[in-house]
Amino acid sequence: MGKTVTAKAKPTSASELRKAFTDFFAEREHKEVASAGLVPPDPTIMFTVAGMVPFKQYFLGLETPQYKRAVSVQKCLRAGGKHNDLEEIGRTSRHLSFFEMLGNFSFGDYFKEDAIIWAWEFSTKVLGFLREDIWVTVHISDDEAEKLWLEKTDVVPEQIQKLDEPNYWKMADTGPCGPCSELYLDRGEEYGKGGGPAIGGHDRFVEFWNLVFMQFEQKEDGSQVELPNPSIDTGAGLERLLALMAGADSVFDVGDLAILIEEVKSMVASAKNKEASTEISQRILVEHSRAAAFLILDGIVPSNEDRGYVLRRLVRRAIRHAQLLEIYSTHKNAVLPLAKKAIELAKDDHPKLAENADKILSILENEESRFLKTLSAGQELLEKEIAQIASQSSKSKVLSGKAIFTLHDTYGFPYDLTEEIAKDEGFELDRQGFEKEMEAQRERARQDHSSKSKEGKGVGVQVEYLKELTGLPKTEFLGNANYNVEGKVLAVLSDGVVLDKTSFYAEAGGQVGDIGRLSKLNSKNDDNPKKSIDVIDTQYGAPEVVFHKTDDSPAFEVGDEVLAEIDGGRRDSTRKHHTATHIIHWALKQILGDHISPQGSLVEPTRLRFDFSHFQALTQEEIAAIEDLCNEEILSNQ
Ligand code: SER
């Protein structure tokens, strides 16, 4: 148990705490600024990792704010890149991937003194923390901050400690940074070793507020330059503070997270024992489901890249822990109902969550059911692999790059999920081998792409390039927007013509070439200006040179101006089938998993074919589901 605190009317709920914090700083002339989204318009970071992120330009002096002081309650995510707490979640009492950060900011206005005085005042008077329970750290170089703590507050002098790297905060590899001073609460000796945060246990001395004295900009070359104005960036985790104030054991024992944990417990079929591993699974499942809802709200959808992949990792980890808890033996979904509950709980403070609930939940439902389908198949493979290596006692316990790659590529196992499972069995992972397999796959994709596009080697169709056409300039294709294009004849062969510009699509990527008509335009020296000829196929005659194949020898000469008209109806039908291949690809991925990639396709005016590999034959239900999804998409006519 933590210490009980004695302040009058101290905030006890998340809403009260948000309000107490913003009121406190609004009274001190801070502008209340609403939370920005989780996706910052900033290429140096993937997510909003701290309250200061939306104000970065102000710190750097690149933009001038309308106000010099601000207070915010910012949604944050720390699950990728420099600030990544994923490994800690569930295993410690205080880490979360998604959380809200209370912060007060000064853009070249007040500096260390006021930041320290107000943090102390808020902690002791509003939160009601006892002076003797608070410890403070400052950067080893920062005598000024130490002096201010001693002179301007009644902090216990022996409870100030100096640290190096932990007391220097950087937003990312580049950007604003500076020395910082942190406030910790001592939860008492039952939580571990004493001696203050510098040497004591992290579960005993819990950091609850970080005051960053923004003074520098970290440059890409490793150097640091002074900011135009020394500034203040502070951050206190809302959920963490709530737990500390309640004297609770962890962030999972208070507020919405506690209610969600109860919800998980009610979903667990058998009265599972209270093993630590069970508790960790419950926490990960709850935390990741809630984080996923907030990520989707901010426009992220599960994918295999960047932010979408972080979301996918969160959901898939959550699913695995739901499986460990055996929730799926009695429930179709686990992430879905928990995200639903998280939305319900947060809807007053985050009204947009409720407004978008349907969309968020349908994306999650989809992601959960898809991964559940491959999860057991992947686990089976992993277990086989592990058993096989274990049986060869001479071998070291390392899972091969190839196995990790197959799990990733075919079964949709994020690397860290495989790692988590393998580590439970005492296995290491050959990360390098895995990266090599990934690179080889990227290389295959590059080669595949370049051989299938632009050069006329449609899937399954090998075109012999025509010697006569080598050296001609590449044809300008204007046929996406125009079905009739005027072009100049650059070459005439016995069975076809090359123009400088054309509306004719040459067969590529499985899509058939256009047919249509070429007509000579009026020309002064020609008695028969309307000469025209049918085009019966269009192919690349040389790399990027469009060859209009005619049914007869064309009566054109090099230099003639011609009108190239395609059969628009046929193209429209072909185009619909082209769009349909994309819809089918998308639907296959939704139902079968992200490993579905086109192995070939044929797109004609009257039919299409889409080749793909999957690790087992499709069931009737899967086929029906894919058809339904495709039809829904087509009917929605976007
Ligand atoms: N940016 C600092 C942090 O995230 C203080 O807000 O800890």
Image (spheres, grey):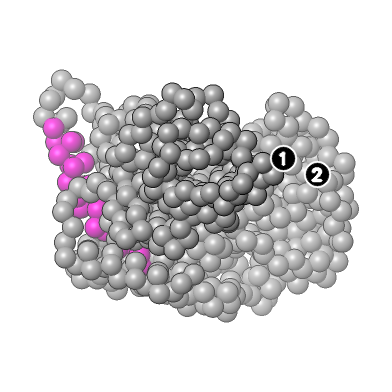
Residue 571, x across and y down, in percent: 44, 58
The span picked out in magenta is 365-388
Residue 118, x across and y down, in percent: 78, 59
Up the image or down, 44 lies above or below 395; here it is: below
- Mark 1 neighbour density, 10 Å: few (under 14) some (14–19) many (20 or more): some
The kind of secondary structure element at disc 2 is helix
Q: Which mark is residue 60?
A: 2
Contact (Cβ within 8 Å) of mark 1 with mark 2? yes
Residue at 18% x, 42% y: name it: 381
Q: Earlier in the sequence, mark 1 or mark 2?
A: 2
C-alpha separation, residue under disc 1 versus residue under disc 2: 8 Å
Residue 349 seen in render: yes
Residue carrying label 1: 175
Disc 1 residue: CB within 8 Å of ligand 1 = no
Disc 2 residue: CB within 8 Å of ligand 1 = no
Up the image or down, 576 lies above or below 413; here it is: below
The kind of secondary structure element at disc 1 is strand
The type of residue carrying mark 2 is: Leu
Residue at 17% x, 46% y: name it: 380
Quick check: 620 left or right of 68?
Answer: left
Residue 409 part of the magenta segment: no
Residue at 33% x, 68% y: name it: 629
- Mark 2 neighbour density, 10 Å: few (under 14) some (14–19) many (20 or more): many
Quick check: 477 left or right of 109?
Answer: left
Residue at 23% x, 68% y: name it: 624
